[in-house]
Image (cartoon, rainbow, N blue to C red):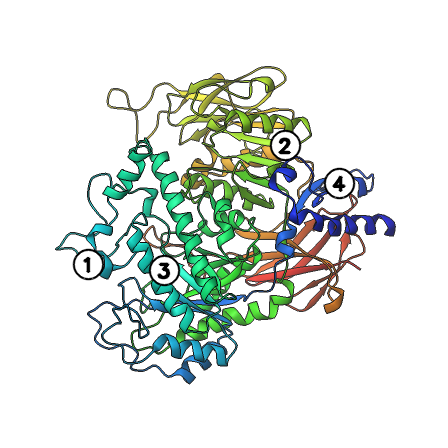
């Protein structure tokens, strides 16, 4: 690659800064200059095939989001310090010592914290005129914590619980959310209290919350306000006020879509009022709302200064919630935090503490995906931070602190988009999406998760989720995308026009013929995607659609059927009826720049993890993409991501690409507990190939502090090999 071409390539990235202010509509129309066409810079060489990594090549189209690269600096090492105390806790803060408390945070490399103004029980931790102040509190705990943080230059935010407030729920039953069955979220009188839910449709309730927020924001020198539980629970409410508002507009209150849109409007109005209240009291104070990683974020993000992804992986969220949600939230131009926890299980897990290796693995994955770190802790009622907890937190944050020069303004480099959608306030965190995200990570794809209205045309590849609702407008955009050289993987019912049995894929030679009556059906490859294994009929445990193919489509796998569906009238052996015959339907097929997967791939892989489903997906990628951004011989459990930092001459930083290699090395676990990453087995001789035209780079292993030899590929990319990856390594590819 000539020096002139290299400079042109780099300037094409820098020139993309103009795209920061462009509208989504303009980007969708192909106007973004941050979509890099690298093909014209590639040497005209035939890519070699290497047994360990697969064929080399140069990626022709990828995306660097310059909104991320332009973010101002925000703290990378936050603690979310829960402090919920019921009326049955007699004393609060009796062991609190401001100097010890602040010093312990500082020693643990914490540079931001969330402390409590009001908890979920409804109790305040400062002398509020509104009350109730917790009766066991004898000091201004919030004020003392804020002062300790200011003394140590620790960014401090005040926590305030909104729609979950036991005190208000018991004293204002008229504000309660009602479910469809006319019950509330309050437990039975003889059950242990847990969740409460109050409705934002009540103006007097909202006014009281705003008064509370104004009081503590005005009184204390806060860097931010963090509101918890601001999202209407389940997106529905059937209280008298909500029913009246909807019926007053001649809307059906029993229509889920109507309910979700109504609650979304209530929520937007509330967070707008909160932001106005905070900024009026303290203009520099940041405003954040938990629970925002749900659909419709583009309409709400203007009211937020950052986003927290609450994703404690050893709780019900699991280890694929964060990787899914971060690829959604990082597209909105504000700092994103990944919120894990020190707990062995969930919030309130006193006595639960992860080993340092597990927490280090979790925060490594957080920063590898372009997010900042947030570790959840819960301070005991005494007010004393536990030394063991902060030793573990400190070890995790020591590594992050040393990496920050390689994290600031580092933007993910992506080639693909997973399209997903739903009603406002519904979550992208679904089993289908988890399965597809797992597949894409294991296939080394660099990707984002987007709603269909977003600017997905900037990517080389688009994957449509199992049940994505494709309307006529989206179908038209997809046709144009394919006509312009884009690649699409269509899965299961995303090949249909929403609300119908009509396919939008007829022009590609695909005709829909309904859902197979067999579950499981069988996947029978018609091309080699299983190595040296003989022909076999693989179970599709979650069933399949039926798709007929005609020219120009080519069938890559056929759908097989058993003799009969197992049931009360017909059954055999322990489980499903064995394969009996092939059908004319395609289970996997290609037509030009479109690959059709006939079965619910995401759901199937999430529920079953069957290796043949991964092979089918990877066959689809090979059919559509001549090269991917990253290749590696690392095991499937390894997460590998690519980011980019623009040059900053004023700080001496040259332009560089960064490859994060995160070693998820689990122990075997029982069905009753999640993965624990407690005894990592170091990866050795990990080769990573980056298929970008960046010859002449210098490489180093940032964490190990080693210089890495760079091997150019014949196609124009580069390869490096890491001798050892215990938990996390970052390869810095410095452009000269």
- x, y percent for residue 483: 67, 26
Q: Is residue 343 visible?
A: no
Disc 2: which residue: 487
- x, y percent for residue 670: 35, 53
Q: CA distance from mark 1 to mark 2?
A: 57 Å
Kindly identify which numbered label has been placed on residue 722.
Answer: none
Would residue 43 be found to the left or right of residue 455 on screen?
right
Tell me whether circle 4 and circle 1 mark residues in contact (CB < 8 Å).
no
152 versus 80 height, above or below: below
Q: CA distance from mark 1 to mark 3?
A: 18 Å
Q: Give the mark nearest the N terminus, 1 or 2.
A: 1
Between residue 252 and residue 247, name the one nearer to us. 247
Q: Give the mark nearest the N terminus, 3 or 2.
A: 3
Kindly identify which numbered label has been placed on residue 171.
Answer: 1
Q: CA distance from mark 4 to mark 1?
A: 72 Å
> Considering the numbered disc 4 on the image, is that residue within a helix, a strand or a loop?
loop
Q: Where, by quadrant of the figure, is residue 507 drawn?
A: top right
Tell me whether circle 3 and circle 4 mark residues in contact (CB < 8 Å).
no
Q: Is residue 77 visible?
A: yes
432 versus 7 height, above or below: above
Mark 3 residue crowding within 10 angstroms, few (<14) / some (14–19) / many (20+): some
Disc 3: which residue: 210
Tell me whether circle 1 and circle 2 mark residues in contact (CB < 8 Å).
no
Disc 4: which residue: 48
**Who's the residue at 55% across and 35% down the image?**
463
């Amino acid at each position: 690659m000539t020096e002139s071409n290299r400079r042109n390539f780099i300037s094409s990235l820098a020139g993309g800064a103009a795209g920061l202010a462009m509208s989504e509509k303009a980007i969708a129309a192909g106007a973004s200059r941050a979509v890099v066409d690298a093909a014209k810079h590639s040497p005209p060489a035939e890519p070699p095939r290497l047994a360990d990594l697969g064929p080399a090549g140069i990626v022709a189209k990828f995306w660097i989001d310059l909104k991320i690269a332009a973010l101002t600096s925000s703290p990378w090492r936050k603690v979310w310090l829960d402090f919920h105390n019921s009326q049955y806790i007699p004393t609060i803060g009796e062991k609190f010592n401001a100097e010890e408390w602040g010093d312990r945070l500082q020693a643990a490399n914490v540079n931001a914290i969330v402390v409590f103004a009001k908890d979920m029980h409804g109790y305040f931790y400062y002398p509020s005129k509104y009350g109730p102040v917790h009766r066991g509190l004898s000091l201004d705990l919030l004020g003392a914590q804020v002062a300790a943080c200011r003394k140590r230059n620790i960014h401090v935010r005040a926590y305030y619980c909104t729609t979950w407030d036991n005190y208000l729920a018991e004293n204002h039953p008229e504000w309660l959310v009602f479910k469809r069955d006319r019950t509330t979220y309050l437990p039975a009188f003889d059950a242990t209290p847990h969740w409460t839910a109050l409705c934002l449709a009540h103006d007097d309730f909202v006014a009281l919350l705003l008064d509370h927020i104004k009081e503590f924001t005005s009184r204390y020198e806060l860097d931010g306000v963090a509101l918890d539980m601001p999202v209407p629970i389940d997106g529905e409410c059937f209280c008298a006020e909500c029913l009246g508002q909807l019926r007053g507009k001649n809307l059906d209150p029993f229509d889920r879509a109507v309910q979700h849109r109504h609650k979304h409007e209530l929520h937007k109005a509330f967070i707008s009022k909160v932001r106005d209240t905070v900024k009026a009291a303290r203009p520099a104070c940041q405003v954040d709302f938990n629970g925002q990683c749900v659909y419709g974020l583009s309409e709400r993000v203007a009211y937020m200064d950052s986003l927290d992804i609450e994703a404690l992986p050893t709780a019900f969220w699991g280890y694929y919630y964060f990787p899914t949600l971060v690829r959604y939230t990082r597209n909105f131009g504000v700092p994103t935090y990944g919120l894990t926890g020190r707990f062995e299980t969930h919030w309130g897990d006193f006595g639960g503490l992860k080993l340092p290796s597990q927490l280090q693995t979790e925060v490594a994955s957080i920063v590898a995906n372009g997010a900042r770190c947030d570790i959840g802790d819960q301070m005991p009622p005494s007010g004393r931070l536990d030394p063991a907890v902060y030793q573990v937190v400190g070890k995790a944050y020591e590594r992050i602190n040393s990496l920050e020069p390689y994290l600031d303004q580092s933007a993910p480099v992506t080639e693909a988009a997973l399209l997903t959608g739903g009603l406002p306030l519904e979550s992208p965190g679904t089993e289908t999406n988890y399965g597809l995200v797992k597949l894409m990570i294991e296939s080394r794809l660099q990707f984002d998760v987007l709603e269909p209205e977003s600017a997905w045309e900037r990517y080389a590849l688009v994957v449509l989720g199992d049940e994505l609702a494709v309307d006529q407008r989206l179908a038209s955009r997809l046709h144009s995308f394919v006509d312009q050289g884009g690649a699409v993987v269509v899965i299961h019912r995303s090949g249909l026009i929403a609300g119908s049995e009509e396919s939008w894929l007829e022009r590609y030679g695909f005709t829909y013929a309904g859902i197979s009556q067999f579950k499981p059906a069988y996947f029978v490859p018609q091309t080699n995607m299983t190595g040296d294994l003989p022909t076999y009929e693989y179970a599709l445990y979650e069933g399949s659609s039926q798709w007929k193919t005609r020219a120009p489509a080519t069938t890559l796998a056929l759908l097989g059927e058993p003799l009969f569906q197992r049931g009360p009238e017909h059954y055999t052996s322990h489980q499903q009826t064995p394969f009996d015959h092939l059908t004319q339907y395609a289970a996997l097929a290609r037509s030009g720049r479109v690959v059709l997967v006939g079965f619910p791939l995401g759901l199937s892989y999430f529920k079953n993890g069957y290796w043949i489903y991964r092979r089918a997906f990877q066959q689809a990628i090979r059919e559509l993409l001549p090269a991917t951004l990253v290749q590696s011989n690392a095991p499937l459990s390894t997460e590998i991501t690519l980011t980019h930092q623009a040059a900053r001459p004023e700080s001496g930083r040259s332009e560089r690409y960064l490859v994060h290699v995160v070693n998820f090395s689990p122990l075997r676990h029982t069905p009753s507990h999640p993965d624990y990453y407690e005894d990592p087995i170091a990866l050795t001789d990990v080769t990573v190939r980056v298929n970008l035209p960046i010859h002449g780079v210098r490489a180093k292993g940032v964490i190990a502090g080693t210089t890495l030899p760079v091997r150019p590929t014949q196609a124009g990319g580069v390869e490096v090999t890491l001798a050892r990856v215990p938990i996390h390594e970052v390869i810095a590819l410095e452009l000269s």
